[in-house]
Every structure is written in C-alpha cells, then in structure tokens.
Image (cartoon, grey):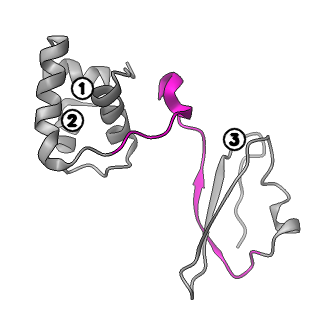
Amino acid sequence: MQVKINPRGSVTALTFRHPTTGLVLVIRGNHPGWWAELGEHIKLTEFELVEITVPAQGLGNWAAEPLPSPTPLALRAGLIASYRERHLCSLKEIAARANVTPRALRGWRSGGLGDRSAKSIRIEALLQRGLRSD
C-alpha cells in the first residue's frame, strides 16, 4: 500500500492492522520525518495502514497531556451542573469555552459524540480540568 504524506507535515504515529490476524501495530516517533524510511526498517507489506495520527490542533497547551478519562454517561449532566455552579455560566458559555457548539455539548451529554472525538476531549478537559479551548 502506498500512502502519500506531506513530507513537511508532522506525523506522530502510524497504526497498521494485519487483515488476517487482526493484530494492530502502532508505531510512534517524535523527530521530523521519522516515518519516511520506515519501510526500509520494518517489513509491513502484509499490514494495511488504518490510521495516521498528527499533532492535535486547537487544543491549547494541554495537547501533550494524557487524554482526560471519559465521564460515564450517567454522570455527565451532574458534571455540567457542577461546572456551571462553580463558574456561574450558562450552557452556551460552557460550549464556547470548550470550542464546541451548544448542540455538540448536548450531544456529548446524551452520549451522541464518540468518547475520543476531538469535541468530546475538549469538553472533558474543560469540565474535568478547567482547561479552556476558546
């Protein structure tokens, strides 16, 4: 499989999956262009590339920190209420601080957003850690 990646772009990880065994292989690197000669060092012809990870955009200074743990669905409304009480703000203001729409915030609260979507991560970071994305 041939994949073209901008040679000047940043890539932090490549994820491969073996189609027969289901084995998943994640390869990470942190210096520019680490991935360019990967095929010369590791035989990956039997694997299919399933994901390319690039540095997070718009996540502020905390992008390098571990991701916040997903809040269980049953506790999300309470987490929002607690944040609103502490910061005396509306749902619209919470959404703005997390850099999401009010609709996305409602979707997260009801479980309609994936736990690892960028929007969910920004909402969790705001509500759990107080880290704003606006």
- Circle 1 residue: 95
Query: Would residue 67 be counted in the magenta stretch?
Result: yes
Instruction: Please state if 17 lies on the left or on the right of 62 as rendered.
Output: right
Marks 2 and 3 close (CB-CB < 8 Å): no
Disc 2 or 3, which lies upstream in sequence? 3
Label 1 Cα crowd, 10 Å radius (few <14 / some 14-19 / many 20+): many
**Quarter of image, res 124:** top left
Image quadrant in which the C terminus is located: top left
Magenta span of residues: 44-69
Q: Which residue is mark 3?
A: 10
Q: Left or right: 117 with respect to 13?
A: left
Q: Which residue is under mark 2?
A: 105
Mark positioned earlier in the residue sequence (1 or 3): 3
| Identity of the residue drawn at 60% across and 44% down | 54
What's the residue at 18%, 43% (across, down)? 107
Name the residue at 61% across, 80% down. Answer: 18
Give SS at disc 3: loop
Asked if the residue under mark 1 is in contact with the one under mark 2, i.e. CB atoms within 8 Å, the reply is yes
Say above or below: 101 vs 52.
above
* Mark 2 or 1, nearer chain start: 1
Query: Element at badge 1?
Result: helix
**CA gap, disc 1 to disc 3?**
29 Å
* Whole-percent x, y for residue 129 in the image: 35, 26
Identity, as a three-letter code, of the amino acid under mark 2: Leu
- Is residue 33 depicted above or below 49 in this figure? above
Residue at the (59%, 39%) spot, across then down: 55
Q: Residues within 10 Å of mark 3 (few under 14, many from 20)?
A: some
The 10 Å Cα crowd at callout 2, few under 14, some 14 to 19, many 20 or more, is many
